[in-house]
């Protein structure tokens, strides 16, 4: 029986943040006084995925600084987020250098979030019968889960968790279609999405279990037993539907990228070692050397030229 090909789509922005804050209490500082925590954590994750999973296709997707259609729809979208620490922002160019040295395409699309780009590529892969593992812990991605689209969740100190249809039902008692309405009801503090004020996770689950969808809930609002909950829903109807628009991931981003450009190619080991040496990542040099003795998607040739991807169109072309 032929093994199903797999595409790993890494939410680069989320991994960047997680890698930085994983070392927040004990940051990695090199001899020049540079904080390298985010770079180290990010590269470690890439080595783990490439070495252990050996994906046939792979891409790293980043958010851009440009406003998205969500910001235009709701000016308060993500307005409560703190500005990225300067010592974290300084590490971004190096992370991009590493990703390029791994010969992994860096994907961005002005006007869209990484979520939307990942979703669009995942749907394209699904049409080709290719399984997609979305490397992220963001619950928004649960709406995309299908037999061929899953979440690859990495948590500090824990084993990787593959979030599929079965686990979604077990953990949240929801279908992927209901995830959008679930988030619309309870909102999302991290993105400053309001939801329905006073409706939390537990109540949102109960309502969807009873009514199935947001539309059916409001069509039968008189059947909501608790008067207080019913009134909150009535008062928050406009907010609920606005929130639903904001949490819905766009799966039709106009990407200027051919799917085959996501094929996993051998990394530039020499360049990776040079980068690690410059940043004093001694342990990573050893891991990369071990990685070089293995395969990436069945290939052992480590001499490859850098590829160019037209989709990268911001931050001065990630120079």
Image: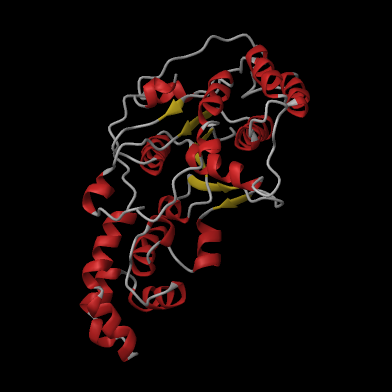
Q: Decide if residue 215 is on the left or right side of residue 272.
A: left
Q: Position of residue 47 (x, y in %)?
A: 66, 30
Q: Decide if residue 74 is on the left or right side of residue 197.
A: left
Going 42% across and 62% down the picture, which residue do you hit?
A: 189
Q: Where is residue 117 in the image (x, y as percent from the top left)?
A: 37, 37
Q: Which residue lies furthest to the front in this view?
A: 33
Going 46% across and 76% down the picture, which residue do you hit?
A: 202
Q: Quadrant of residue 166?
A: bottom right
Q: Quadrant of the C terminus?
A: top left
Q: Decide if residue 51 is on the left or right side of residue 119.
A: right
* Residue 140 in sight here: yes
Going 53% across and 20% down the picture, which residue do you hit?
A: 100
Q: Position of residue 109 (x, y in %)?
A: 34, 32
* Residue 258 in sight here: no
Q: Where is residue 257 in the image (x, y as percent from the top left)?
A: 36, 24
Q: Decide if residue 4 is on the left or right side of residue 292.
A: left
214 or 96, nearer to the observer: 96
Q: In which quarter of the image is the N terminus?
A: top right
Q: Quadrant of residue 91?
A: top right
Q: Establish if 148 lies above or below 174.
A: above
Image mark count? 0
191 or 127, nearer to the observer: 191
Q: Quadrant of residue 143?
A: bottom left
Asked which colour scheme the image uses, the reply is secondary structure
């Amino acid at each position: 029986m032929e093994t199903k090909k797999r595409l790993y789509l890494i939410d680069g922005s989320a991994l960047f943040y997680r890698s930085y804050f994983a070392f927040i209490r004990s940051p990695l500082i090199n001899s020049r006084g540079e904080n390298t925590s985010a770079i180290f954590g990010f590269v470690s994750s890439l080595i783990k995925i490439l070495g252990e999973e050996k994906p046939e296709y792979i891409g790293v997707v980043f958010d851009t600084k440009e406003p998205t259609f969500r910001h235009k729809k709701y000016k308060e979208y993500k307005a409560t987020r703190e500005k990225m620490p300067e010592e974290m922002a300084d590490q971004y160019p190096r992370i991009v250098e590493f990703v390029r040295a791994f010969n992994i395409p860096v994907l961005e699309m002005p006007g869209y979030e990484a979520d939307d780009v990942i979703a669009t590529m995942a749907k394209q892969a699904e049409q080709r019968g290719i399984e997609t593992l979305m490397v992220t812990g963001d619950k928004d991605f649960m709406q995309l889960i299908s037999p061929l689209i899953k979440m690859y969740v990495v948590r500090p100190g824990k084993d990787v968790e593959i979030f599929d249809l079965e686990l979604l039902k077990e953990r949240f008692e929801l279908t992927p279609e209901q995830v959008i309405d679930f988030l619309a009801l309870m909102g999302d503090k991290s993105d400053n999405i309001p939801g329905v004020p006073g409706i939390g996770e537990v109540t949102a689950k109960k309502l969807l279990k009873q009514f199935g969808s947001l539309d059916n809930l409001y069509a039968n609002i008189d059947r909501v037993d608790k008067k207080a909950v019913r009134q909150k829903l009535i008062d928050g109807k406009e907010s609920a539907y606005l929130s639903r628009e904001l949490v819905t991931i766009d799966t039709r981003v106009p990407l200027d990228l051919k799917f085959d450009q996501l094929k996993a190619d051998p990394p530039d080991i020499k360049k990776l070692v040079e980068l690690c040496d410059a940043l004093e990542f001694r342990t990573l040099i050893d891991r990369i050397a071990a990685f070089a003795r293995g395969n990436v998607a069945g290939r052992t040739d480590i001499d490859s030229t850098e590829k160019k991807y037209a989709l990268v169109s911001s931050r001065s072309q990630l120079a």
